[in-house]
Image: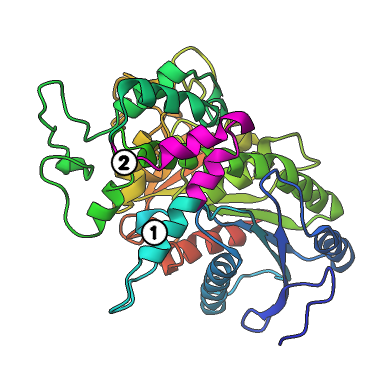
Amino acid sequence: MADRLAPGAPYRTIDLNGVTAPFYIVPFDKDGVCTGPLTARNLVETVADQRPTDVFLFSHGWNNDWQAATSRYDEFITGFARMRAEHPLDREFRPVLVGVIWPSTALVMPWERGPQILGVERDDDAVAEERAEIAEVAAIVPEEERARFYELAQRPADLTDQEAAEFAGLVVGAFGGDDELGLVEADAESVLEVWQSLPGRPASDGTVPDLSDIGLPGATPAEGPDAAAAGLLQALDPRGLVRLATVLLMKDRAGRVGGRGVADLLEDLLSAGDAHVHLVGHSYGAKVVLSALVARPHPRQVESVLLLQPALSNRCFASDADGAGRPGGYRPALERTRQPVMTTYSKHDFPLTKVFHWAVRRPSDLGEAVIAGAPNRYAALGGFGPGGIEGEVSKVVATLPPQNYAMPEHGKRVIAVEASNVIKGHGEVQVPGTFWMLLTQVARSGG
């Protein structure tokens, strides 16, 4: 058995092509409480004592346990280091690396499942996923009503209208609260309406709409991986509402972890020295790092923010997110980073172009018209690019070295990278194109 790490020690020390960097893993629980306080304290002391030039804080998205998250961090860091060696910086570079770990594994999206092993059934995995999702949602159901919740959750798609309304009322807690567009209120009736509006539900005459063009359940279902992803939303099957509620719970959890524990860590890192602090978040990890940035005023700006296929509303930076003058919840981030926020979007990201805006709609968004080419205001930033910030965004196509990104004009606070040429799927962000984006930000640090 391997020796246990010394309390508070770096998870490992990484050789970044001639540059040695401590790599800290800082874990948080679902409420944003740091579960590795000695590690966080040692990290901050290292930054204060060793005075690194750069601090990188990474956050993973949904469906990443410790092993998966650290593996993805390693892959991204190794690829970035290789690119930095091939394209050296013209300044000193002494980095410290930080990976955030937060509990995001209750929901295993169909497009994120591992490959099926030949001859081995995945029934055990499917059952484990379903039980984990039910347990997450059950935690928000009052204890005295939990037995009834479990009874209805185990039923097939044969609920009566009364039972469906009852089940919607039991899970209503997942549909309210705050998101990046502001305060959301929900009641059982509106939750039921959302559930009934999901794609694939038969019309009153019994026909099923053909939604195959957007990859969701319909008369002619999609083939291949998209068919599995489309199975995320099953109309009026209790499991479909459980999964929908879990999507929202994980989204809210990302914001809670970021806005509490990671915000504290970020403030300590910014106070500990004058290193360039770079935030990198993938999927719901984008919500983690942005929530940390906007939770409160920090002692100074971070240097850069890189959002890789962010699972957020595309209007999260808008000056008027809802048509009533209310700004997007992450608009303050634009002033809290020295460089413009860089965010990717890709037409190949199936969940963020085809599913996300159905899964994360809150009741207040029902019936909203198409906005700027996106399905609604909950359309994903990583699927359609930013909306509502015309005049403040520079839209570019992803490049590869040695082609540099042009400096954005004055007043452009967001660089939206159309990355379909380099990002071929939601999780495929450990690629040369994304390494080059981060290297570009690092090269411009302090300029």
> Image height check: is 244 above or below 324?
below
Q: Quadrant of the N terminus?
A: bottom right
- For discs 1 and 2, the disc positioned in front in the rendered view: 2
Residue 95 placement: quadrant? bottom right
Residue 354 placement: quadrant? top left
The segment highlighted magenta reads 132-157
Residue 329, position as x, y percentages in the image: 58, 29
Q: Is residue 353 located in the magenta-colored stretch of the structure?
A: no
Residue named by callout 2: 156
Residue at the far top in the pictured view: 324
Q: Earlier in the sequence, mark 1 or mark 2?
A: 1
Q: Is residue 142 located in the magenta-colored stretch of the structure?
A: yes
Taking the image as shown, residue 155 lies to the left or right of residue 137, namely: left
Q: Secondary structure at mark 2?
A: loop
Label ID, residue 126: 1
Residue at x-position 36% and y-position 45%: 352
Q: Amino acid at mark 1?
A: Ala
Q: How many marks?
A: 2
Residue 248, position as x, y percentages in the image: 49, 37
Residue at x-position 29% and y-position 24%: 370
